[in-house]
Amino acid sequence: MPTVLIPTPLRRLTANQAKVEVAGDTVDVLLHNLEAGYPGIGERLLDADGKIKRFINVFVNEDEIRTLQGADTPLAAGDRVSIVPAMAGGA
């Protein structure tokens, strides 16, 4: 099963777990299964159409999914999926 690395601001939705194992053969299926297991996390990651919000970056192992097959990027057991909210700010 892939391992999902949960960013600090979302850990309250995963009982403060930094890593969770979630089934899914694609990133899209995995994110929807993540919501099923941890209600409320999906609304922070997915828009009303169920697509990944534009300010959420998702990596499979070391590769950003936009450079792969997007939400259809296939996953295998042992893959690490990182969720990285975009940062803004500065002066």
Image (cartoon, helix red, strand yellow):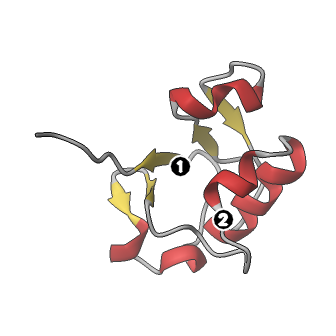
Residue placed farthest to the front in the image? Answer: 91
Circle 2 is placed at which residue position? Answer: 46
Q: Residue at x 32, y 45 (%)?
A: 87
Q: Amino acid at mark 2?
A: Leu
Circle 1 is placed at which residue position? Answer: 81
The answer to whether residue 26 is seen in the rendering is no
Q: In the displayed structure, would residue 87 be above or below residue 24?
A: above
- For residue 57, the mark is none
> Which one is nearer the viewer's eye here, 7 or 27?
7
Q: Name the spot of residue 61 as percent of width and height, x first.
A: 42, 50
Q: Residue at x 48, y 46 (%)?
A: 82
Query: In this rendering, which labeled residue sits more in front, label 2 or label 1?
Result: 2
Q: Residue at x 73, y 80 (%)?
A: 49
Dot 1: what SS?
strand
- Crowding near pointer 2: few (<14 within 10 Å), some, many (20+)? some
Q: Name the spot of residue 58 as percent of width and height, x first.
A: 47, 57
In which quadrant will I find the C terminus?
A: top left
Give left or right: position of 60 versus 12.
left
Q: Amino acid at mark 1?
A: Val
| Callout 2–callout 1 Cβ contact below 8 Å | no
Q: In the displayed structure, would residue 13 be above or below residue 16?
A: below
Residue placed farthest to the top in the image? Answer: 16
Q: Name the spot of residue 75 as percent of width and height, x first.
A: 60, 63
